[in-house]
Amino acid sequence: MEGRARLFLRHKALTLLATLVFVLMFTLYLALQPRGVQVSVLVTASNKGVLLALIAVAQTLPVLTGGIDLSVGAIVVLANCLASNLVNGSPAHIAMGMVAVLLCGAAAGCANALAVVVARLQPIIATLATSTMFYGVSLLLRPGPGGDVDDDVASALTGDLAGIPVSALILLGLLLCLWLPFRRSVTGRGVYAVGSSENSAYMSGVPVGRAKAAAYVGAGLFSGIAGLLLTLIAESAQASAEQAGDFTLNSIAAVVIGGTSLFGGLGGPVGSVIGAFILRTIGDLLFVLAASPLWQPLFQGLILLFAVSLGALPLLRVRNRLETFR
């Protein structure tokens, strides 16, 4: 029992540290908040945090396989532009529009999976190329800023339920209904096995191709959900390459801060969610402290550097560093 506890702490040390940091930062933010602890403050913080958390979860799946997805931000923007055209009208039309947005995200993930698994391209090259394609489609869908989103649906899904932010409930539901069953499935365990050692996983009979494909399709699906949430929050859309790039970079930062190894096989979406909320809270803290927004990238960079340094500590405990990657 003691050995299991020690192993758990060893694997979850960065995630537990990130959780502690977030609790301290968010407590300080609420204490400094001029309006005090109000439902509106919690809802706003939740909406911003959940949006980045969904993108971070999307990024986590490919990272667990030892890859990376540079197209998650572009898929979010694509889903945002598509949703701004479809999430309106009758209830049936709105429902079908939401389903179409999610299918669009999954289809984008399928394109990445084909490039990585079937064409056997390096993930960083494949997803960089597809991100440009997805951005081009976004421009076709939304040449200029705008959109028509149903106000009642947007208010219902980005408001509160008995004082609890609906977006936080949605995130919790997605983790319980999508991630937890996937993690316990054969394919989900295969994702971790491939990230730990692809050659060993293959020799053990793990369906490597299926595990990688599931990771990239899942990344596309969660990115599509994030794009839909962005549309409901902003009630508009814009095909912005800068925004897509920011989403992608912040998702990688959140993954690392949350304790997921960029080498694959270690970590999970829960830590990435915590990392995303840390990044969002940095901006909120700087706002209540009346600090210049120009400081935010500096603080994010320092936190990311610190998290990466902690993640690299195991390399210092072995004489031959190649042993770490076997």
Image (cartoon, rainbow, N blue to C red):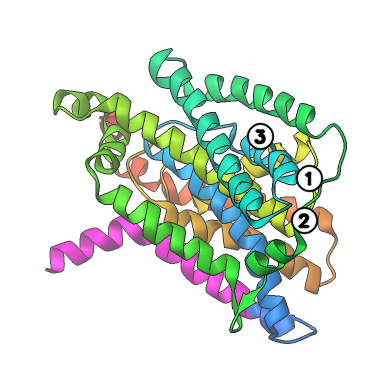
At 75% from the left edge and 45% from the top edge, which residue is drawn? 84
Residue 324 bears which disc, if any?
A: none
Q: What is the secondary structure assignment of the residue under circle 2?
A: helix
Q: Give the residue number, with chain letter if any, for mark 3.
A: 74
Q: Secondary structure at mark 3?
A: helix
Quarter of the image for residue 13 reads bottom left
Which residue is painted at 73% across and 40% down in the image?
A: 81
Front label number (2 vs 3): 2
Name the dominant secondary structure of the magenta segment.
helix
Name which residue type carries label 1.
Ala
Mark 1 sits on what residue? 237
> What type is the residue that disc 3 sits on?
Ala
- Please provide percent x and percent y for residue 190: 26, 37
Check if residue 204 falls in the magenta segment: no
Question: Residue visible at 72% across and 69% down?
Answer: 285
Please tell me how crowded label 1 is: few (under 14), some (14-19), or many (20+) other residues with Cα within 10 Å: many
Mark yes or no: residue 172 visible: yes
**Could you tell whether 273 is left or right of 300 in the image?**
left
Q: Secondary structure at mark 1?
A: loop
The magenta stretch is 1-27
Question: Magenta span has 6?
Answer: yes
Residue 174: image quadrant is bottom left
Badge 2: few (under 14), some or many (20 or more) residues near its Cα, within 10 Å? some
Residue 249 versus residue 217: which sits nearer the camera? Answer: 217
Disc 2 marks which residue? 234
Distance Cα–Cα, label 2 vs label 1: 7 Å
Q: Nearer the viewer, mark 3 or mark 1?
A: 1
Could you give the CA–CA distance between mark 3 and mark 1, rounded to whole angstroms? 13 Å
Give the image location of residue 90, x and y in percent.
69, 54
